[in-house]
Structure formats: C-alpha cells, structure tokens
Amino acid sequence: MNAVWTFVRRAALPRIGTILLAWVALLAVEHVAVGFGYRALFVGTWEMGAARTFVSPITLAMLLPGAVLAYLFAELARNGVREEAARVACAIFAALGSAAVAIGVSGGRHMESLAVRAPFVALLSLLGATAAYVAAPRLVGFAARSPRAFAAIGAVGAGLFWAADSFVLPRLYPAFHLGLFVLTLAAAAFAARPIWNFRRTGTVVLVFSVACALVTPWAAQRLATVDNLRVVLLEHAPLMGRAVMLAAAIAPPADDLAEGEGLTSLDSVTSAKVIPGQTGQTGQVPRALDWTGRDIVLISVDALRADHVGAYGYKRPTTPNIDKLAAEGTLFESAYCPTPHTSYSITSMMTGKYMRPLLLVGLGEDSETWAKLMRQYGHLTAAFYPPAVFFIDASRFTTFEKSGLDFEYRRVEFSSADERAEQVGRYLDRGAQPSRPLFLWVHLFEPHEPYVMHPEHLFGAPDAPTDRDRYDSEVAAADAGIGKILARVREKRPHAVVMLTADHGEEFGEHGGRYHGTTVYDEQVRVPLIVAGGGAPKRVSSVVQTIDLLPTTLSALGIPRPARLRGRDLGSLIADRPSQEAPAGGLAFVETDHFTLLARGQDRLVCARKAGACTLYDAKSDPHEEHDVGGARPDTVKELRQLTAAIAREHGRLERGDAQAWPEALRRGSQGDVEAAPDVAMLLDDVRLDVRRKAADVLFDLRAPATAAALQRALATAEDPQVRAGCALALVRLGEAPSRAAEDALKSPLEWKRRAALAFAERGDARGLADLLAWWNESRGEREMNLDFERAKELLVAFAKLRDPSAVSPLVRTLGDVRLRPFIADALATIGEPSARPSLLAAFATERYVPTRPHLARALLALGATREEMRAPLLRFAGLPEPMPEAMTFALDAKVLDEVHGGWVAPVAKGGAPTAEVAVTLPTPRQKRPAPLRLLVLLEKEGDTVQGTAEARPVSSASGEGALRVVELGPEALELPRIHLQLAAPGGIRALWLLPHTEEIEPPPPEPWDAGSVDPADSGQ
C-alpha cells in the first residue's frame, strides 16, 4: 500500500498536474485570442477580467477529470504500448471515440437512415482503431527520443484543432466539435512531455485545480449575472464556452418569473386605472382629454421608421406634411409597436392588447375592436387598407379579416397614397353623414418593400439610387398622400382629432438584417406617433405603445374601457397634466419569435428568449443600441427581466376561451419559452386530461432535453393515447430511439400521424413522407403557406433530411412564398435534384429580396448551375448601387470571372502565398446603354485595405464590407477599350471584376384585389 501511495504522490499526481499546466497555457492563449479578436463585442475590459475570475476556475475544474483520464491513457501507452494487448487497448479506445463522433455527426435528431449511418459509423471506427494501433508505438518512441519536437508538434496541433473547433461549421454538428475539443486537449497534453517529471510544478498546479473545483459553485453563480460575457464566450471560445455551459447547469440564470412573483398585476404600468366610485353601469371614466362628439382620424403608414421622419430629426425632406402635423400636436419621441409584423401590429393596435401571444395559444379572436366600440357609441366607421394587412400568418387572422376589423364601410385594395386621398374624399363627400361623428382609418402601403423611386420625390444619385434612397422616396410619396387626405378631412371635418403612426419600422443592415419582423431593435420597432387635436404642441419623451391609442380614445370620448385592454391612457401626457397612472418614463413591450424588448425610460432590455440571455442599452447615450451596459447595472437588468416575465405572465389571463384556464407554464410554453419546459413537463401528471394532453403537445414543439426523464415516466404510465403519442414523439425529437407508442403514432388520427411523420423524418426515416407531402400540399395558399412559419421550416428541414426527389415538385410550387423562399432553396440544394434548377434560376434572376439572393445562389451552385446560367444574375446583383456582398465569391465558385467578361483570378502561387500586388489590364464591358463602371476587389483577408491606380487614378478610397472592396470608376473610363490596373493589398488579392452599374429589379404591378366593398361614389350614396 505504501508503495502505491508513494507512486501516486511522486509520479501520478505531479504528471496529472503537468497535463493541467499545458491546458492552463492553452486557456491563457484562448483568453488573449478572444479578448483581442472579439474586443468589439465586449462592454469593457472588465468583462475579460470577469472571465479570468469566474470562467477560468470553472474551466480548470471541468478539465480536472479529463487530466486524470489523459494521464491513465498516457501511462498505458508509455509502459505497455509495445505489447500487443496494450496496442489493442489503445485501438479499442480510439475506435469507441471515433464511433461516438460518427454517431453524433450522422445522428442526433436529424439521423440518417440505418442503411447509411451504420456503414459510416463502422468505417470511421475502423479508421480510428487502425490509426491508434499503428501510430501509438511510433508516437511513444518519438516522444522518448525527441521530447521537445514532440511537444512542439503537440502545441501546433492544439492550435489547429482549436481553430477548427472555433471556425469550422460553427453551431453545427455538436459531436464533430466535441471530437475537435478532445483532440485539442490531447494535442496540448503532448506539449507537456518535456516537463513530465517536474514534480513540484505539477503538484502545485493540481492543488490549484482542486481549489478551483471547490470555488466553482460560487464562480458559476457570479457568472450567471454577466449575460454579454456568456454570449460571447459561448459563440467564440471553445474551452471557456463549454465552461459557461457547465456553469449554467450548476447555477442556472435566475428564473425571472419566480423572482417577479410580487408583480402579479401590471395595471399600474400598462393600464389606466379607474378612480373608485366613478365606474359602474353609467360608464363614467375620468379623463384628461375631452373629445366628446369629435371625429377621430387614424392614419398608419406601413414600415415607416421614426428616424426617417423630419420631425424626428431626419435631415432629408421626406415628410413636410407629417412635420407640419407634429408642429400642431403632441409628438411621442419613443413610441413602439408590439410586434414588427403588420398583421400582429395592426390587430394589436385595433384591440388595445398584445395579440401575438394570445393568437399563439388560440385566444383573442373574440376581442372587441376599436371600430366595434366606436359604432356602439354612435360613430360612423370607415377603413381604407390593403389586403396585405392580413398576409402574414393569415390563418390566425381569419376572424379579423372576415369582419373587416368591424368597420361598417371598408375599401380593401392595393392603392397608392394619391388614390387613397381620392377615395377618402369621395367617401367624405357622399358616404359619411355629417351629423354623426366619424372614426376613419387609412393605412398607406408605400414605404413597404419593394421600394420604388417616385420621379416627383428623388433622393440619392439619379443613376444609382440605393434602397435607402428608394425607401425615402416612398416615404415622401406617402407623406404627399397624407397631406391630401388631411386637406380633405379638414375641409369636411375641421375639428377632427388626427393620429398618425406606423405598424413597424424597417432595417437596412443596422444589426445585420433587412426589412422587418426579425429583431426588436429600434430600427424595426420604434415608430412615429403624433396626436393632433388635444393640448398644446409638445414633444413627449415618455415611452409609449401603439396599443395605447385605443384606450386613449375611449377615455377622451367618455366610453367605458373594456376590462381586457392592455394599453394605457395617454391623455395626461397629451394634455400635459400630472398622472399617477404609470411610472415615470413609460413602458413598452415588444416581441418576435426569438426576441423580446422592454423599453422603460432610457433603458432598452433586449432578450434572446430561447437562450435566456439579455443585454441592456441606454437609448440616450447609445441610440444605435451597440454597447451593452448590463454588466455595470445588474440591478436594472434584474428588475427589467422580472418585469418582462410579469408582462408575459399577464398574457391571456383576462381572455375568454378554452386556453384561459391553462396553467401559466402551458401559456409560456405555447409561446415558445423553452425555460418553461421543466414546468410543462410536471403537468404530464396533472389531474386534468386536457392539461396533460396540452403539455405533451407543447413538449413536442419545445424539444427541451431537460424534459426527457419526465417524458419517459409519463410514457410508461400514461393511459391516454394522445398523451402517450405526444410523449413518445417528443422523445423521438430529442434523439431517443422510437418506442412502440411512437411507431403506433404513424397510424394514428391525422394530427398525430403528421407529427409522427415529421419526428421520424427528422431522423432520416421516410415512412411518413407521403403524409408530410400531403400536409405541405394542403397548406399551400394563394400567397403563402397556410401553415405556422416555424412548422413550415421544420417540414423543410425534414424534406432535406430525407432527400427524396418526390418533394421537389411541391417545394418548387411554393417558391412564391416570400418568407419561406430562402429555406425552400436550402432544402432543394440539400435534396440535390437537378430538376429544381430551372425554377431556382427563374427565381434568382428576378429576386427582389436581398437576404434571399445568397440562398438561391448557393442552391444553384449546389445543383450544378453552369457559368452561363449564373453570369447574368450575378452580374446584375454585383452592379447594383448596393452590390450583393457575396456576388464575387459566388462568381468565383461559378467560374464566371474570365478575362473576356472583365474578370481576373489570382493564379495559384507556389507554397500558397497570396498575391499581394496585381498589374492587369481588363477589357471595358460591352453595354447596350452606357453606365458607370465599377471594379470589385475580393481580398484574402476581411477588413484589409486596397490601394493602387486605375489608369493612373488612385483607388485607395474603396468602400465595401468584409473581404469585398468596391471601386467606382469615373465616366472617362467608358471611353477606354481597356483599363490598366495596378493594385496592392497587404494580405493579398483573390480576384477582380470590372463591370457596369445595373438597376434594381422593378417590382411587379399591384395585383388586383376585389374585397367586395362598394364605393359610395359608385352606389350613389
């Protein structure tokens, strides 16, 4: 026993410590690499200090068991590898590791069929075993002969594996990255060979690592409060990122709902309170404004962001009429829509509540609308809006669409702002009774994509307008229409109260996206809000919401407030009277599928719902929301997270319907809140059958690994077939082998049969393919899929997994769905059926949506599109005023960059050295109509600079992002048959492309739309 202890103390423990020492060095390198390479993502240098203080101890504690295993394996190799049994043991160990990686790469919830997967796993396992059996004795011998060279190779290998883990297929194939992680640690352990016998140093490091393990719970608790640091490390640090995941398991971030239990009602912050004793059947409501008998005119503009309005500080003269209206009334500087999608935003504004979370759980369709309430109290109601108001997730708005939001007169068609003004004028002349007050709503569609340049409103370069220029032209056209509408209204109804707002904003790449509906940053969700008709002209800084307009109107008209409204009365702000109804600074809540925003005062808390991570921005000092200040203000983050959770908890509590009595966890889970999954799983044992069924249904969609044990228990004990089917299929989606209950679900009634087909298809099992195709075909609508957007994306992933050519035709027929088109292209590329190529080419050549173009291009290249097929669309998209950033890379891959067509590709140099200097002459492109010329330069390194001359003129002022640089050539270049270029870039130049400017694709004319409404001018009214 003494001998064993002596060996452990003098050999084993120190050598385990030396392995840990090598990993400490690797951790230090990662600290430097992440801290320097991603410094722009950190709030300040203190965050990397927090990483050293909190993350490093957790990382060492996490690596401690691995060091023990590495030592045991090293001893096995060092002392017995020349013996056959030891070599076989090494080979078995390598075979098992290789098989694990192979199973993970080919499996998980997107598993290939067994016929494909089994040979792949066997082959990789055999290769791993063979490599270990052959290489082990050679490695041991080399380590003994040249320990320093062995260590150097290990260090280089560790760096390469670490880089691959960081940059190759990020977020994809977890098993692949786990294998790279193991190889990184193994290679780094090799670097410890020269200090293998440094007993004292190894012992000190080992003792320090054990101490780190003891403080890990404390460090994990502290780390849970630093959201921005956790997000950056998870994305970019292989070692520390895994430590962050371990810390989350040890000390999960605070449950916002649990911490916010005291916030049981938000009436004080989201609703106007009625003074006791002044309510009752008479419906008397205290009000700061008195609009009794007055007309109400509501004008909403689609996709109008606040910061493109002159009254909000925009420098271009886009909105003179809106600016004039703002000068007459109250301008709210911080107004927010509830969801940056037209359908949800408009119905929310018309009902005074957050409609998206209600509709997701089947509630809110019976909501009283603005028009219905006004009609009940004697107002005429008329609406002029396009059918696109209900295009997004149309199946959820059937009731609202059929009722026309309860307006008694409505004109539903695509019309220009000028046409709307004429229609409104005719209605006021002939259809509106002057003796009755009027509620009039006009929704203008101009600024919505596709953007069109209006000749009477020109912005930017005349021959090369950008999307921003066209957007501003659209805004100006809408503003001109607003001026005409207001003139007609004030001619006939001079005392009308006018409200002007928008349904959402529009993004132009501020946070990496385009259009709207994807984030909750200001460019997409902050809208103009102006109320003219009550109080003196003023600007209000308090945060407000568009759902506040309905309760404000009801209060000002003396109409009793329905109990289910969530908005608050803004009357005190408009009338400039003190109020106790809301906290200073106001409040707004915004959500999308993946994000939430809580705006209060100058604070903006943006949370990634499924990651549980939030960032805090100060709107005053950081209006572009680029710098997280949450680390410096943890108490504010905690408070706002609790308030966000409390608002979410309020959704549906006052609604009528089958879902009203659902437990809170089910409501949260139905809205996609993964953090609610453990609580939903507990409801699988609820006494109510409908709750158990709904819990199984929700868990099928949440796919939360933490619920696996509860699902297994419920599957073993449940008697209800629906509960059993839901649990069984939820487990299949978590990667479990299909049970008998899951197999039976493939033959169950339609709903669960289709879900079973989806779950099996995600594993590569095609037994339910016919059901999936029927589901897809039956959901195809006239404009878009009549299927939940997230579910439609899941079906596309399933089709891609199965790779069955029979899915190609149904997918091609739905390429017209704007939102799904990029995902359909991805699926067709994976399926690999060349018959899809003509349809994809037609779509690519006319694609107006900027983010979709790269998806179509990648799909075409994957399906073998020829250089001639790709040249024309790539040439067009590269020549736009805002060139497609990936156009050069796609052109390079498609081999269209030949000299005849103005292209040049760097030759392959010996040793792979990049071409740092280029001297080349390119022919001037032939053009039917002369257009300015542009030179695109593709660099080897992102962020690099390019300098040089084009026909002796300097080109150092090139613009562009990433590795692409854009050089605009002067008009004199058109006169030259060829252009001589001398260019240089420190990191090297990959390719050049000389091409003409092109024009953006014109949008199609509006589709005719018959809404069945009658124009009073045509009916003689």
Image (cartoon, rainbow, N blue to C red):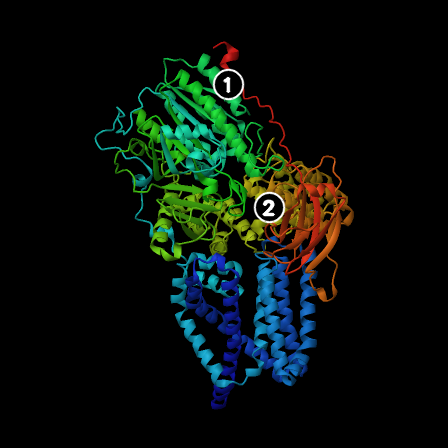
Q: Quadrant of residue 819?
A: top right
Residue at image mark 1: 422
Q: Which residue is mark 2?
A: 758
Give the left or right position of residue 732, taking residue 312 as reference.
right
Which amino acid does the dot numbered 2 rest on?
Answer: Leu
Q: Report the number of numbered marks.
A: 2
- Kind of residue indicated by mark 1: Glu
| Residue 560 visible in the picture | no
Other-residue count near label 2 (Cα within 10 Å), few / some / many at <14 / 14–19 / ≥20: many
Q: Residue at x 64, y 62 (%)?
A: 102
For the view shown, which residue lies furthest in the bottom direction?
3
The residue furthest left is 277
Rounded to the nearest angstrom, the CA distance separating label 2 from label 1 is 51 Å
> In screen coordinates, is 725 left or right of 995?
left
Residue 218, numbered label? none
Whole-percent x and y of residue 412? Answer: 52, 23
Whether residue 355 is visible here, answered yes or no, is yes
In front of the other: 636 or 825: 636
In the rendered image, residue 883, in percent from the top left (x then y), is placed at: 63, 44
